[in-house]
Image (cartoon, grey):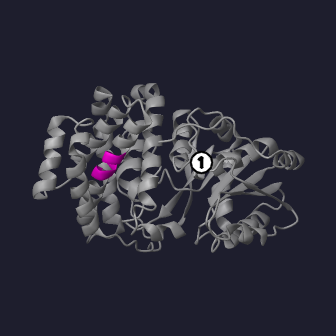
Amino acid sequence: MNQGWNKNASLDPEVIKKSKEIKPIDIMVGVLCKNVEPTVLNVLNVINEGLYRYFPDYKKAIVISRAESTDNTDGAIRLFQPYNSIHKIVTKDMINEGKGAGVMTIFEIAHYAGAKCVVLMDGDLLSVKPGWIQTIASPIIYGRADLTVPYYIRHKYDGVITNNLVYPFTRALYGIDIRQPIAGEYAISKNLYELLRQHPLFPPDFGVDIFILTVAAAEGLYVKEGLFSLKIHESTTRYLEPEKFLIPMFRKVIGSMFELAKYYEDYWKSKPVLWHSKFYRECFSQKPIPVLIDIEKMKKTFKDEFLASKNTIKQFLPESIVKELEKIVSNGSSFDSDFWVEVVYNYASAWKNQKTESEKYLLIDTLKTLWIGRFVAYANEVEKMDMNDAERVIQKQAELFEEKFDYLRSIY
């Protein structure tokens, strides 16, 4: 549960020198690279084309931040040559920690280069198009937003951490209806990235996505959805091996989300309640790529992990909720949305009292078990639904998080 940035980390002096030499930059696209040998060259070429085509009169730069890779990502990056009008900086992540380390590296370069707009892109995207750069950056360039977040068209089983936890929690606490708060790609104003650089909770890992959105919302900056597309990225293929990818990501994202809720407690406790429309809009876009999940395996994982960690779970939840969980596990009763909200809010409240890293790890690890149980219930509920009906289930759940918001205030 690593929280906060290592203040001793710094850029290579040569990178600082080059960043200052290209100052001021209008649009900087930062690309995060770790084990992306098969995809990164295409991503860089598409970004290069997007910048050249849509922003001919702007000062432009592409920054490539490299984490330690086990494949030949570095070799693929060396093959990339941008147009003459586009500056290129390639550097290692300032520290070897995770995605947040790459983001901070890009922000530091943006700071020295005086970049007015920073776009963040993952190096494993398979569906990126040149027009993405224009669509996501334009609200920043025209002064209409400080942060643009994509709305990706995703399969009902994709976005497994977002749909049942990050989206409804963030919407309820910060009054911001951004459907995919940890989308992975962003466009960021200078005001926002300078604020993020100095923030005491800047996470060096997967928690950086929810950190960017939460800080923007809680600090009163303007956030909007600014890119609508199908998203295909290589990491989706790892859903069938959750221990390798999803579970580590879950720990980092939710740890950061709860720590930020603690940090911004005064803000969300005093904010007015914002009720969202109960009219559900229909999506009739292209169909998303199906995501394969192993429901029976997840159901078994939930049951086994709950029985093994029941005594630990009792530290974080009232006895009445634990008894209800025992019923769900023993006789297969439904782990419904209404009950799930109470579980999440009690865990968010319990986070405040966890002092050590090991205590926080235990809390997140047991919540992860219950989240698997809730996902199994959701997957069974939407099994025969199309994407719009499944989306209504997610929206109604988010409304319950809003309706029960006073419950969180009362126990926090």
Residue 355 found in image quarter: top left
Mark 1 residue type:
Gly
Q: Where is residue 277 drawn, in percent x and y?
A: 36, 47
How busy is the neighbourhood of tag 1: few (under 14 within 10 Å), some, or many (20 plus)?
Answer: many
Left or right of 410? Residue 129 is right
- Locate the C terminus by quadrant: top left
Residue 368, magenta (yes or no): yes
Q: Is residue 14 visible?
A: yes
Determine whether, in the image, residue 77 is placed left or right of residue 332. Answer: right
What is the magenta segment's predominant secondary structure? helix
Foreground of the two, 216 or 142:
216
Residue 130 against residue 141 in the figure, above or below:
below
Q: What are the residue bounds of the magenta stretch?
A: 365-370
Q: Is residue 173 above or below residue 393?
A: above
Name which residue lies at 66% across and 66% down.
131
Residue marked by disc 1: 100
Q: Which residue is rendered at x = 17% and y = 55% of the image?
A: 334
The quadrant where residue 384 appears: bottom left
Element marked by disc 1: helix
